[in-house]
Amino acid sequence: AKEAARKPGLMGRLMGRSTAAPVVRRVLDDEMLEQLEELLISTDMGVDTALRVTANMAEGRFGKRLSVEEIKRLLAAEVARIMDPIAKPLPLYSKTPQVVLVVGVNGSGKTTTIGKLASQFKAAGKNVVIAAGDTFRAAAVEQLQVWGERAGVPVLTAAQGSDPASLAFDAMGQAERDGADLLLIDTAGRLQNRGDLMEELAKIVRVIRKKDPSAPHNTLLVLDATTGQNALNQVKVFQEISDVSGLVMTKLDGTAKGGVLVALADKFGLPIHAIGVGEQIDDLQPFDPQEFADALMG
Ligand code: GDP
C-alpha cells in the first residue's frame, strides 16, 4: 500500500515501473506524443496548452530516439518558455502610497497573502498599511489583524457590515498621513452574488480615486492552485468585475499539480507576482519559471 501511495513523478509514469532508467531511449512517435499529452493534461494544464507544449517540443524531433531525461528537459524548457514573460515580482512605483487592491474568492488565500506581502515589504524597509475591506466577514477581519501583528503592520478596520468603500477612503487618508509606501486593501470574495461584488469593487475604486486618480496601482487576484482548472474561470470572472493586473497563486506546496499555472500563462498572459507555498509568514516566493517547470515534470 505504501508503494502505491508514493506517486511516481510525471516522467516516472512515462517510463513505467519496470523500466526505471532515465537513459532508456524511446522513439518520439504518435503514440509517445499522445502519452505525453495525457501526462501534461493530468497536471491540470488543460488540453489546448498540453497539445501546444508537446507539439512545440516535438518539432524537428519526430521519429527520433530520445531518452526520458531528454524528453523531460525539453518539455520543461517549453513550459519555462511560456512562463518566462509572466514571472514578475509586484512592481513598485515611486508614487506613494501605492494602492494594491487584493481580490479573489473566499478561501483562496487573500488574507494570508496580504499578511505575507506586508511582512516582505516591511522587511524590505517599506512602510505598509493594511485595510480590512471585507467588512462583512468578522473572521476575515480578525485574521487580518493577527497577520498585521505578525508582520508589524497597522490594520485598519471598520464596524462589521459597514461600507468597504468608506473604509478604503479612510485608509487612503491614513496611508497618506503616515507617509506609507504601500496600502494593501483586502476585499470581499462572495462570488455567489457577482453583481453586488462588482458594484462593491467599483465603488472602492471610485472612492480611492478621489484621493488619487491613479489608484489602485495594482489589482492582485489571488488564486488557489488546488482548484485546478477552475482557476481559469475565476480569472475570467474577476477580469469582468475588476481590473486584474496580476496574480498570486497559493497552495502550490500541497498536492496541487500546478499545471493550471501554465494554462493561465498561455491564455491570459497576466503577470504572476508570487506563489504561496505554505501557511507561514515566509511562505511566499517569487515565481521561478525554470524551477516550476522542472518540478512540474518531476
Ligand atoms: P481568504 O478567505 O481568501 O482570505 O483565505 P485565507 O487567507 O483565510 O486562506 C484560506 C486557507 O488557506 C487558510 O487555512 C490558509 O492557511 C490557507 N493558505 C493560504 N495560502 C496558503 C498556501 O500558500 N499554502 C497552504 N498550504 N495553505 C495556504
Image (tube, rainbow, N blue to C red):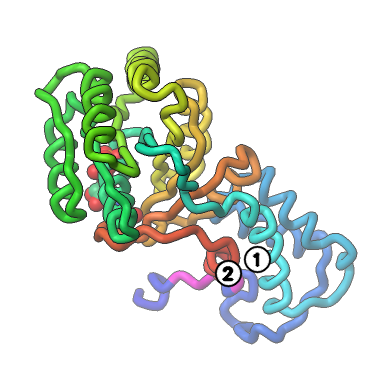
Residue tagged by mark 1?
76
| Location of residue 275 in the rendering, given as x and y in whole percent from the top left corner | 43, 55
Task: Confirm whether the magenta stretch covers residue 8.
Answer: yes
Along the viewing direction, whichever of 216 and 105 lies nearer the viewer:
216
Q: Residue at image x 24%, y 27%? A: 173
- In this orientation, does residue 243 appear? yes
Question: In the displayed structure, would residue 292 be above or below residue 190?
Answer: below
Going by the image, does 110 lie left or right of 249? left
| Location of residue 162 in the rendering, given as x and y in whole percent from the top left corner | 16, 18
Label 1 neighbour load within 10 Å: few <14, some 14-19, many 20+: many
Dot 2 amino acid type: Asp
Residue tagged by mark 2?
294
Q: From the image, which quarter does the C terminus lie in?
A: bottom right
Task: Confirm whether the magenta stretch covers residue 187.
Answer: no
Label 1 element class:
helix
The residues colored magenta run 7-11
Label 2 element class:
helix
For marks 2 and 1 on the same chain, the one whose residue lies earlier in the sequence: 1
Going by the image, does 21 lie left or right of 243? right
Dividing the picture into quadrants, the one containing residue 33 is: bottom right
| Location of residue 114 in the rendering, given as x and y in whole percent from the top left corner | 30, 45
Q: Residue at image x 73%, y 76%? A: 70
